[in-house]
Image (tube, rainbow, N blue to C red):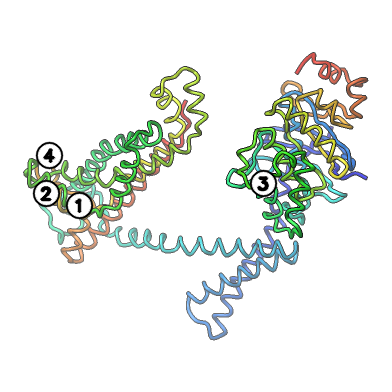
Amino acid sequence: MTAVTPTRPWRATPAVLAAESASIAAAAIVAVLLVRFTGFEGKLAIAALFLVLATSFTALNEGRQRGWEAAKNAGARAIVIACAVIVLVPLMSIMWTVVDNGRHALRLNFFTQDMAIASGDSPFDEGGALHSIIGTAQLVAMSSIVSIPLGILAALYLTEIRGRLSPIIRFLTQAMSGVPSVVAGLFVYSAWILGPGKTYSGVAGAMALSILMLPTVARTAEEVLKLVPDHLREAGQALGGTQWRTVAGIVLPTARSGLFTAGILGVARISGETAPLLLTIFGASAVNLSVNNGPVSALPVFVFSHLKLGTDNAVARAWTGALVLMVLVLVLFSVARWFGGRKSR
Amino acid sequence: MNDLVAKGVHAWFGDRLVLEDVNLEFAHGTVTALIGPSGCGKSTFIRTLNRMHEFVPEAQFAGEVLLSGKDIYAPAEDVTKIRLRIGMVFQKPNPFPAMTIRENVLAGPKLARLKVDDKDVLVEQSLTQAGLWKEVKDRLDAPALALSGGQQQRLCIARSLAVQPQVLLMDEPCSALDPGSTLRIEETIEEIKQDVTIVIVTHNMQQAARVSDYTAFFLAELGEPGRMVEYNETKQIFSNPQDNRTERYVTGQFG
């Protein structure tokens, strides 16, 4: 028999797509022409005119072909896309500003040297942020080791055990997530550094960050675990699994990618924190591998202190620090996503 | 007069052809049963009839489905209008849990923004057609989930009927129900078939024999896409099947 080619009749045909692109292109041309030859002026006017014209042109195009309902649909779609673009523009602008300003001081030695013998004002090929990169890595690792397991366990208590303390714990995590970060720093400063800790240290910083990270992880993990259907829990227990074995073998793997997201959100919450770190790790200019003895640095603190110096070279270094922090967080997220998205076998 | 005509319907999931060249006509006021073993493409087929096949992201399609002579896959067709005219009842009863019985029946007109002259009349009429009115008339404002499984399924049928569809697709509507409820639903089908053309997928051959006027037998041979093997009046399919495979299936020798 003759082969029949599969199609997706519900998809827009090339002709429809062409007509749509044509109306968007027409909108762009008319917008430029209007600005050139009438009272409208400036790039912003082009953008605004383009949005209005593209919306109405695509709506007209659809309406001509498929009637009023389709026109409304096309108009609404154009407005939604325009909103998405408007939201994305500031984000892209921020990223571009960081990249643009950060590239000047970006040298290899930025990753291999610390600022022990260089000052913020030194030329760019002297000194770097190695101490801060190591510090940030240590802090994030220590806080994650404490907060991610604790947060997930708290979420498990709320969703699986549903014990008598659940309402209180839920209330406390909510209250904790509202704590200003500097308060967490002050708390560790007064309770640990002025007390048994005796000195600024990486551990003190990780304590403050853990306090901030814990509620984020716990609340996200709880939401994710609530999405696991109850009949899976029942099925697991009906096979003779204990509650613990069912949670470990069925519930957690089912919620796996969501739990990774909970961890990511926790890391995102703390990796850019500056205020609590100023009170707990203080900041340093040399690599300090010891986490419980003396001040250490972290990238946000590096950025903060160099901005405060105010000289051209120092400010450029601060931007580079921000750029490295941004890329670091981005890489961390991609890796976690990749792990979380992989099918477990 | 044929309400619904499927012409050369093919369906794919990704590149895998699961349904090949199905041609069927559904006449007004008749009940057509689609039977066949699991995985033979009958559920896929019924989902191409109201364009629910395209909800699967990788799904592809070829062919035509004519509703009163117009192809529902034509680019100018509004898919929501089509689904308004071709209702569907699913395998598992799915009343809207946050709504009362009455609200469930009125959900269709509300979602489609249809003007209803007298809501009470529509509720009573739909529930009566679905054979549920006597049981629920005193508790229309009770939550829909308070009903038993069989009642919930009849509520779903009433909900589908409230928008007065031309065609009603039923995808194994009784497979999750007890025999008593199954019987009630079969009575309901008998009741409504003058007004609505019914296409029903069922695994239960006695049910197909009881409720349907026509029967189509689907089969997917190992490693091949599903095809329609035989179509005829139900009496013929069960008493005098032309194809040897149909005979073996309806007499319970495989599947």
* Residue at which label 2 appears: A190
Chain under numbered label 2: A
Q: Earlier in the sequence, mark 1 or mark 4?
A: 1
What percent of the width, then of the height, locates residue B189?
81, 36
* Residue at which label 1 appears: A276
**Eyeballing the image, is A344 above or below B198?**
above
Q: Residue type at mark 4: give it.
A: Asn
Distance from disc 1 to disc 2, alpha carbons, whole Å, reads 12 Å
- Farthest front residue? B138
Q: Earlier in the sequence, mark 1 or mark 2?
A: 2
* Disc 2 versus disc 4: nearer the observer: 2
What percent of the width, then of the height, locates residue B78?
74, 55
**Eyeballing the image, is A14 above or below B132?**
below
Q: Are marks 1 and 4 on the same chain?
A: yes
Chain under numbered label 3: B
Is residue A51 shown left or right of residue B246? Answer: left
Distance from disc 3 to disc 4, alpha carbons, whole Å, reads 68 Å
Q: Are marks 1 and 2 on the same chain?
A: yes
Distance from disc 1 to disc 4, alpha carbons, whole Å, reads 17 Å
* Residue at which label 4 appears: A292
The one nearer the camera, B227 or B154, is B154
Q: Is residue A283 visible?
A: no
Callout 3: SS: loop
* Disc 1 versus disc 3: nearer the observer: 3
Q: Residue at x 70, y 48 (%)?
A: B105
Distance from disc 3 to disc 2, alpha carbons, whole Å, reads 63 Å
Q: Is residue B11 visible?
A: yes
Q: Residue type at mark 2: give it.
A: Ser
Image quarter (top left, top right, bottom left or bottom right) of the N terminus of chain B = top right
Q: Residue type at mark 1: give it.
A: Pro
Q: Residue type at mark 3: give it.
A: Leu
Contact, CB < 8 Å: mark 1 with mark 2? Answer: no
